[in-house]
Amino acid sequence: MECERLIRLIKDWYLRVKSETMAPARMMQFVDQHVKDCEICQAELDLADEIEKIREFVVPESKIPKAIRTQDDKPTPEISPDEDDEEQEEQYIEEEDDEEIDEDMDDPSQPDL
């Protein structure tokens, strides 16, 4: 960046973002407005790339428009339990039921049927 004023402004705005007195998106609006009005910034060819890096750093991903966000190629994780887990759970429940029946048979307070 060649524009000393923009550098100073970005530092000031970023401190405000960190202290939560300015929204990150608002900071980037100010940056865009400055670039639009500044002859030094308009003459700089790679400024747009530098500003985009700052935008990615400052603006949380949830606030980036969906059209700009990169989509993950990862599939959504499976929510339902695995089949093996279901089988183990069923076996555990059956064992608990068997134990309860055995305890009932040993309990002298229970009348015989």
Image (cartoon, rainbow, N blue to C red):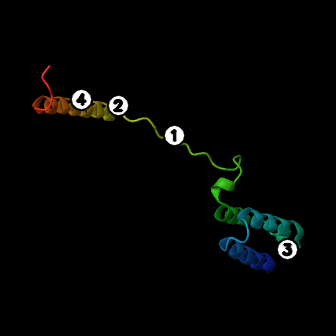
| Rendering coords of residue 24 (x, y %) | 71, 65
Name the residue type under label 4: Glu
Check disc 4: other Cα within 10 Å, few if <14, some if 14-19, many if 20+: few
The answer to which of 113 and 74 lies nearer the viewer is 113
Camera-near label (1 vs 3) is 1
- Position of the N terminus by quadrant: bottom right
Residue 76, numbered label: 1
Q: Mark 4 or 2 closer to N-term?
A: 2
Q: Nearer the viewer, mark 3 or mark 2?
A: 2
Q: Secondary structure at mark 2?
A: helix
In three-dimensional space, the C-alpha distance between marks 4 and 2, rounded to whole angstroms, equals 17 Å
Disc 3 versus disc 2: distance between alpha carbons? 64 Å
| Local secondary structure at mark 4 | helix
In this image, 105 relative to 64: left or right? left
Disc 4 to disc 1, C-alpha distance: 33 Å
Q: CA distance from mark 3 to mark 4?
A: 77 Å
Marks 1 & 3, CB-CB < 8 Å contact: no
- Mark 3 and mark 2 lie on one chain; the one further toward the N terminus is 3
Quarter-wise, where is residue 104 in the image? top left
